[in-house]
Amino acid sequence: MTDHTFDLVVLGGGSGGYAAALRAAELGKTVAIVEKDKLGGTCLHRGCIPTKALLHAAEVADTTRDAASIGVRASFEGVDPDGVRAYRENIVAKKFAGLQGLIKARGITVIAGEGRLEAGPAVRVGDDLYRGTDVVLATGSYSRTLPGLEIGGRVLTSEHALDLSEIPERVVILGGGVIGVEFASVWRSFGVDVTIVEALPHLAPSEDLALSKGLERAFRKRGIAYSLGVRFQSVSQTADAVTVTLEDGKTLEADYLLVAVGRGPSTAGLGFEEAGVTLDRGFVVTDDRLRTGVANVWAVGDIVPGLQLAHRGFQQGIFVAEEIAGLSPVVVPDVYIPKVTYSHPELASVGLTQAQAESAHGADAVVAYEYNLAGNGKSEILGTSGIVKVVRVVDGPVVGVHLIGDRVGELIAEGQLAVVWEAHPEDIAPFIHAHPTQSEALGEAFLALAGKPLHTV
Ligand SMILES: Cc1cc2nc3c(=O)[nH]c(=O)nc-3n(C[C@H](O)[C@H](O)[C@H](O)COP(=O)(O)OP(=O)(O)OC[C@H]3O[C@@H](n4cnc5c(N)ncnc54)[C@H](O)[C@@H]3O)c2cc1C
């Protein structure tokens, strides 16, 4: 058995883990990352990046199909699954090479293998023990399923869906959250018959109701079917098809069932509890400074209860590295983390929904303004509809920004600054937006809330 010693040992090289490693190395620490698969984790290899490449291919397919409507002659001949895969894999490969180069340039040691937490703190990989003054747990998450719903054959997770070598004719998607909605959008653009089944009353159920309803309208127009407020009961499959039965007795036939009901924490069997780390339904319990109950053991990313997003992992990784270095970084609560669903149309939000703001501040103390993208020149040019919704406290700050429409994900950074800096619409309304841009829609909402609407009555 060999002992190795570092200032910081990170278990898991995904978004949260590698961000902690990069920042710690920048701060002069000796750092090791233990990774059993590939640096970059879910986001780079099976999540954010490959799905967004698929969504871009889907956008190009839609644009080509509709080219005649803007006077451009083009013929849409179909989607080549091998070509889309090559495009996607090439992007992932480039980003992977870039990340490996960065890790090397910062002098971080990468240990290939499956690690297990031990008291000390330390991480064991086979016969080797990697001791750290501090250890960061960042083992990520896996696709969950429901009791009695076995994955396999024609019942897929998002990982299998990405690996499909064909474009199916019909799919049923269980779950109308972000992953279900994004795959529904891609497949529909590729010509697939899509039905989403969601147990809660709306698609994108964690978003402001105005966004959920807008998405439902847009998907209906695109021919994406959905059953809301109904639970899955059972599934059976043959060599050629799946039959999904819902609790209301309805049955749906398809080539595949995609199970997109959320992600569970990858923490089982890794020695966490034996080393004294407290788990709650598999998630690592931390305080707001991401300390587990065990001295010098920290946790970041999807294993920490809350939003499971890559950029939250980045933020937490940076935070922990700075905390270890004694820099006392500021705690960023989940409500300040922006969220984007990259479907057609996109959803983007930050801060409180109107309902959350009303329950926090009282219904009379909150005012919301919706600006329709129909009034926005750039959105008209792009052929997208949607809304910008800004929620503020009466005579007080902006507390929530909620957007729906193609490309609105790019606008949420400004919404985040407004919410996090507790800006009052009166203060930011004078900072005019470039014309014609979609960002003007956000400016129009701030102007209206400041009592001086420009292009609305
Ligand atoms: C289809 C899909 C699309 C997504 N799209 C987006 C998006 O657009 N934007 C966004 O912000 N988020 C998106 N996400 C979520 C995002 O991928 C995760 O929030 C993010 O990857 C979490 O980072 P993490 O570091 O916690 O875990 P992970 O990225 O899962 O990394 C954990 C790493 O730990 C390694 N590991 C686990 N156990 C061990 C062990 N015992 N020993 C050694 N190594 C181990 C794993 O191999 C993995 O590399 C998406 C997820 C999916 C599935």
Image (cartoon, rainbow, N blue to C red):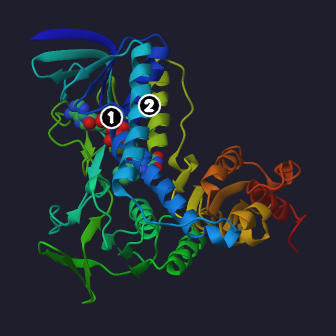
Residue nearer the viewer, 172 or 365: 172
User: Badge 1 is on which residue?
Assistant: 138
What's the residue type where badge 2 is placed?
Gly
What's the residue type where badge 1 is placed?
Ala
User: Could you tell me if residue 287 is visible in this image?
Assistant: no
Quarter occupied by residue 253? bottom left
Q: Position of residue 383 (x, y in %)?
A: 68, 68
Measuring 22% from the left and 10% from the top, which residue is drawn there?
A: 4
Measuring 50% from the left and 18% from the top, which residue is drawn there?
A: 326
Report crowding for label 2: few under 14, some 14 to 19, many 20 or more residues within 10 A (C-alpha): many
Q: Quadrant of ligand 1?
A: top left
Measuring 48% from the left and 64% from the top, which residue is drawn there?
A: 206
Q: Is residue 371 left or right of residue 311?
A: right
Mark 1 and ligand 1: say if the CB distance to the nearest ligand atom is below 8 Å.
Answer: yes
User: Badge 2 is on which residue?
Assistant: 317
Q: Quadrant of the C terminus?
A: bottom right
Residue nearer the viewer, 276 or 157: 157
Measuring 84% from the left and 65% from the top, which residue is drawn there?
A: 448
Quarter occupied by residue 266? top left
Helix, strand or loop at disc 2? helix
User: Could you tell me if residue 19 is visible in this image?
Assistant: yes
Helix, strand or loop at disc 1? loop
Above or below for 256 versus 283: below
**For the image shown, how many numbered marks are present on the structure?**
2
Q: Earlier in the sequence, mark 2 or mark 1?
A: 1
Q: Position of residue 72 (x, y in %)?
A: 67, 65
Mark 2 and ligand 1: say if the CB distance to the nearest ligand atom is below 8 Å.
Answer: yes
Question: Distance of mark 2 from mark 1, alpha carbons?
Answer: 9 Å
Determine contact: label 2, label 1, CB under 8 Å.
Answer: yes
Q: Position of residue 68 (x, y in %)?
A: 64, 71
